[in-house]
Each structure stands twice: as structure tokens, then as C-alpha cells.
Image (cartoon, helix red, strand yellow):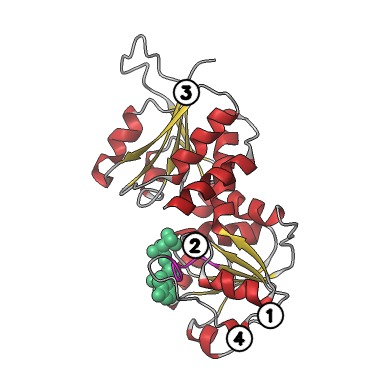
Amino acid sequence: MEPKKFGVIGHPIGHSLSAVMHTRVFKELNLPHTYEAFDVAPENLKEFITNSDLTGINVTIPHKVEVMKLMDELDQSAKDIHAVNTVKLSPQPNTNNPTPQNFKRNSVGHNTDAVGFSESLKEEDINLENKNVLVIGAGGVSRAILISLTNNNANVTLTNRTKQKAIDLIQELSINPKIIDYQELTTKNQLPEIDIIVNTTSIGMHPNENTSPIPKEFLKPNHIIFDAVYNPLKTKLIKDAEFIGCKTISGVNMLVHQGAQSLRIWLGIEPPIQAMKDEVLKHLKTQ
Ligand code: ATR
């Protein structure tokens, strides 16, 4: 089999969990492909995409929106979310004769974050249809989750510290969730009617491990908690929720499932989910 090259681009890129996760997949499935992390500054993005000999690229902060403009095509997921996290380049360049014509490839932008989120819940037998879901945060992670929830017919309530950002985001995404004031999250108990709470903010992330978006006393055992933060592996929100007896889902699962969906798009393979999860957890534990 012809070896293919894959990679993730970001700036900064740091220690990439995507690289270790995808490399494990290729090893597990005995595939000759490689996956590397590339630090690409914004001013070099166009050149990188145009001249890349990669078959597939994962895209992370800060390029997810800018890279859209460089695509020949966008699939429905990227159009809905207004951001690209997965690029498929085809056909392969002719490396024996790399003339400029041979390097003209078709680029298609996808976004696998929404599938990553919904698969993380499906794995836990959680059906989103008609569920009351509170989403906290209106940043980059939130947009894919909001689209996933809307596509799965959940009843969404959105809150963000900066309310205007939530208003702008739902307008951009053409969705219509209920918006509540962020202050009310900690002052008034807004949660009696809520089935699933989704934290998409960076609250609780290292080095602010002792913070949580929701006071523990507002949590009830019937709440399902999804925390997109996975550093630390157990955030304060997850620890509080476990103490109360809630079902909890870590952001690691979303990371793994979005990566798995990228592999389906690039190679049409069914990825080994548990091996991917094991590899990511192994690296997070040693960080
Ligand atoms: P990401 O791509 O990870 O979503 P982001 O786009 O910077 O990152 O978004 C961060 C989110 O976390 C935002 O919703 C942000 O709220 P603001 O829009 O008000 O900035 C939220 N956030 C970060 N720190 C927060 C804090 N200490 N309290 C409340 N919200 C916070």
C-alpha cells in the first residue's frame, strides 16, 4: 500500500494529541501512513495549504475559520458550523513529476467536531432528541456543539459571560436557542428543567483547576454533564458531578470521535476507538 502523509496545523501547536492518536491508529491497523504536527503561522497558511503534499489535514486554533477561504469545496458540516477542522486533498500529487500542474489538487473542507460531540453521547446511550440542554460558552468549541444539538433536535439554552457574543454566534449559525444571562448560572438555580449541561468554556482548565461554571449545590443526580475541558482529566465540574451521582462525559471522548470521523473521511476506514482513547489518556496522564 502507498504510504500517505497526514498532519495537524495550528499556531502554536505544542504537544499534539492528534499526532499521537492518529499514529497509534496507523500502527494498530498496520497502515504505512504517517501523521505529524506542523506549527503554521497565520501568514504562512495559504502557502502551506497550496503546496502541501499531505492527503489529510486537521486544522486547529487559530486557522479553523481562515482555512475555509482556501478550500475548493466545503461539505455541509463546514457550511453549518462556519469553520473547518478537517481538509481532504485529492488526488495525490505526482511526486515523480512535481510540475505546478501536477500539484493542482482539489481541497474539501469538513468539520468533524459536531459528529465528535454527538458520537461521545451516543457511546453513552444518550439520545439528544427533545432533551433540554444548557450550553455554557460561545467560543470555538461551542459552535460545533450548538449545531450538533440543533441537528439532533435538542431544546437548547445558551449562556455566555459576554452575552453579545452568544447573540452574534446564534445569528451567524442561523439557529435560535433560548439565551439566559450568565450571572444567573451562579445566582439563580436555572437547572431544574435541564437534562444535559455542556461546558464549552475554559473554566476549570489547567492552571485554574479549582473553578467550575456551576455551583455544586445546583447539580442533581439526573443531570448529565459533558465537559469539553480535558486538562485536567477530571475538572472540578466533573468531580462535583460525580460526587452528586451524575453521569459524566469527558472532552477526551469528543477529541477521539472527531479524529475518528476525520479518518473515515480521509481513508474510509473504521478507526479503533478504544485504542485511540487509551493513547490520548496515556499522554494526558504523563503531561
Ligand atoms: P474555545 O475555542 O476553546 O471555545 P474561545 O473561543 O476563546 O475558546 O472561547 C472561550 C469561551 O470560554 C468563551 O465563551 C468565554 O467567554 P467570553 O465570550 O465572555 O470571553 C468563556 N470563558 C473563558 N474564561 C471564562 C471565565 N473565567 N468565566 C466565564 N467564561 C469564560
| Front residue (pair 69, 244) | 244
Residue at 44 percent across and 59 percent down: it is 140
Residue 133 appears in the picture as rendered: no
Residue 146 appears in the picture as rendered: yes
Task: Work out how far the residue at label 2 is from the one at label 4, CA to CA, in angstroms.
Answer: 21 Å
Q: Quadrant of residue 131?
A: bottom right
How many residues crowd mark 3 within 10 Å: few (<14), some (14–19), many (20+)?
some
N-terminal-most mark, 2 or 3: 3
Q: Position of residue 31 (x, y in %)?
A: 55, 23
Q: Which residue is mark 1?
A: 220
- Which mark is nearer the camera, 3 or 1? 1
| Front residue (pair 14, 97) | 14
| Front residue (pair 256, 44) | 256
Q: Judge left or right: residue 134 versus residue 137.
A: right
Q: Position of residue 176 (x, y in %)?
A: 59, 69
Q: Which residue is mark 4?
A: 217
Disc 3 is placed on an element classified as loop
N-terminal-most mark, 1 or 2: 1
Magenta: main secondary structure equals loop
Span of residues in magenta = 199-205
N-terminal-most mark, 3 or 1: 3
Q: Which residue is mark 3?
A: 4
N-terminal-most mark, 2 or 4: 4
